[in-house]
Image (cartoon, coloured by chain):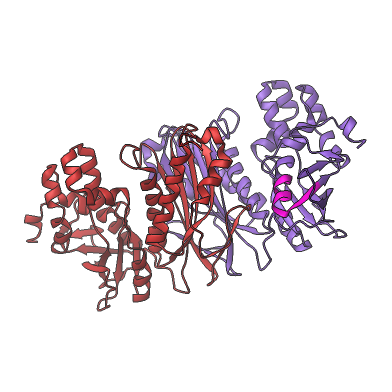
Chain colours: A red, B purple
Amino acid sequence: MSNLETVAGVGENEALKRTIARLNLSDHALVGPGDDSAIISAPDGRFAVTTDTMIEGHDFKLDWSSAYDLGWKAVATNIADIAAMGAVPTALVVALTVPGETQVSWLEYFADGLKAACLALAPGCGVVGGDLAASEQIMISVAAHGSLEGRSPVLRSGAEIGDVLAVAGTLGRAAAGLALLESGNRDAISAYDDWVNVQRRPQPPIRAGVEAAEAGATSMLDLSDGLARDAARIAKASGVTIQIDPQQLQGFEAVLEEAARAIEANPSDWVIGGGEDHSLLATFPAGTKLPRAFKPIGVILPKGPAPVMLGAGPMPERGWDSSKSSTS
Amino acid sequence: MSNLETVAGVGENEALKRTIARLNLSDHALVGPGDDSAIISAPDGRFAVTTDTMIEGHDFKLDWSSAYDLGWKAVATNIADIAAMGAVPTALVVALTVPGETQVSWLEYFADGLKAACLALAPGCGVVGGDLAASEQIMISVAAHGSLEGRSPVLRSGAEIGDVLAVAGTLGRAAAGLALLESGNRDAISAYDDWVNVQRRPQPPIRAGVEAAEAGATSMLDLSDGLARDAARIAKASGVTIQIDPQQLQGFEAVLEEAARAIEANPSDWVIGGGEDHSLLATFPAGTKLPRAFKPIGVILPKGPAPVMLGAGPMPERGWDSSKSSTS
């Protein structure tokens, strides 16, 4: 078979069959791909479900992300939403639309990325169904499923006054990676490829979601739109104000400073505004022994004029000058 | 608020919020839309899941289908795959991508179509999560979920020699509707708008899926690609040959004859080759009292040279001349 076979050439059914053949099976599938529906185990009588879509040109560029990267990222971004409920990812269905001239090998690498992300981030989880169709733009839509294993779901609305705010995972690295790619500065892209790789293949702390739920987290979400915006979501849903300690963000900022200097950017923009690390933000009752993955970064206050404060002032929309704000 | 507000104008978040506000709730949602994931009840410890995507230009044309039609059809096509397992549809997640200039009112009508189809075809089922993104083409991707309520799933692979083959729902009407639309013959489109409406808003016999499972169906699938192709899927998965009785198809053909004459088409092409009615094809042990929705159309034979036979000969790829084949 030629490497140059296209989806239009072999037909969508055949291309889908070859793509699915490369995937790992879900440990939770009672009936896997190939029938009208898959049947998935839900041992505690409930399942979590979420969906997220990535569109070529809007959410990714083919110049910057390989098929493998996109498969990985589609899994990572969706299962982070499962983890944010305190659930274990179990099964995915993937809808993919591609131009007819797309090579079948591209689909196969995409499948390899799906599989690698499942194995690395959520062992036992796998793709149980898919759909492949022709389109002008590439579109990747995933629905992810999870099991709460008897635990209560951790909602956004449960934060209580006096709780500790904590984050598991990195902050600002994916945004740094995107800024590096956008800069077009090849030396900087190559020097800081760790951050570029977080943008391409995020590593959300999936296990930490269950650990947070087990430790008694009162609220949790996946940081997809940045610390400032996502913290405001918890604050609004819970009817509280979140106060973030700027000193606790300095460590996140420090690791990005060199890369920021290389492209004349402000690392605090990335830490506050950048979301695609898909880290987990959660609140815990004061005195909780936090799971190792979580680092405290703030506290929950009674509802004030601003949903989120950075030190004594309202959270800026973007970054801040840490040399000043750290005195607040 | 103006009727001319666009998705780009109000922003994707606001447009999504307004769209979701028009939807019915799922009776099975323990946590509905608005958090990282929804939580859905799965009382027997399992759930069915399937996904299907519709792409503008490939699967529909905006000249022929309204936003309401598309919402309806997205639900109908997906829940037919749930019904085909013998499951009750419980919850949907919907990913929609539209150009930024799309009017918010278009999304609202789309939501009305989603809701109407749930209420009409699968009461209790509702949309529990969604995603809205900007794209050049409209793309609608749904993942549908269902509950087996303790029953065994009805697979494609269980047909046994001696079983009766039966169909619930219509055959060829959606294909007739599509042919009428493609003909551009306005008089014919208007005269046979019942068939055009089956194309726009299919009415799969969702309840019949559960009834078939309860009656002991040995195999079942949703007719999405036409009787010939889908019967072959059961035959191949079950390792048998399916013999369809052409006389039993004549009733399906007869109702389409007038429309076929109006645009010089062959109604048997539609009955054999047309699939978008999303009817259910199932096999039952001989002597089973079939549920009322099912009409017997054939029998299961030991595996022969052709997976599907029409009378004494192999099933033609497309239609047949019923005046001849009925003598076979």
Q: Is residue A185 visible?
A: yes
Q: Can residue B22 be seen in this view?
A: no
Q: In this view, does B298 lie above or below B3?
A: below
Q: Where is residue A197 in the image (x, y as percent from the top left)?
A: 27, 50
Q: Position of residue A83 (x, y in %)?
A: 39, 63
Q: In this view, does A89 lie above or below B221?
A: below
Q: Position of residue B88 (x, y in %)?
A: 65, 59
Q: Main secondary structure of the magenta part?
A: helix
Q: In which quarter of the image is residue A180?
A: top left
Q: Nearer the viewer, residue A72 or A167?
A: A72
Q: In which quarter of the image is residue A60?
A: top left
**Is residue B325 left or right of B217 when viewed as pictured?**
right
At x 57%, y 66%, the residue is B42
Q: In which quarter of the image is the C terminus of chain B?
A: top right
Q: Position of residue B256 (x, y in %)?
A: 80, 32
**Is residue A128 left or right of A116 when viewed as pictured?**
right
Q: Quadrant of the N terminus of chain B?
A: top left
**Is residue A273 left or right of A117 when viewed as pictured?**
left
**Is residue B261 left or right of B65 when viewed as pictured?**
right
Q: Quadrant of residue B185?
A: top right
Q: Which of A179 and B16 is in front in this view?
A: A179
> Which span of residues is magenta-colored?
B231-242
At x 40%, y 65%, the residue is A85
Furthest-right residue in this view: B327
At x 42%, y 46%, the residue is A109
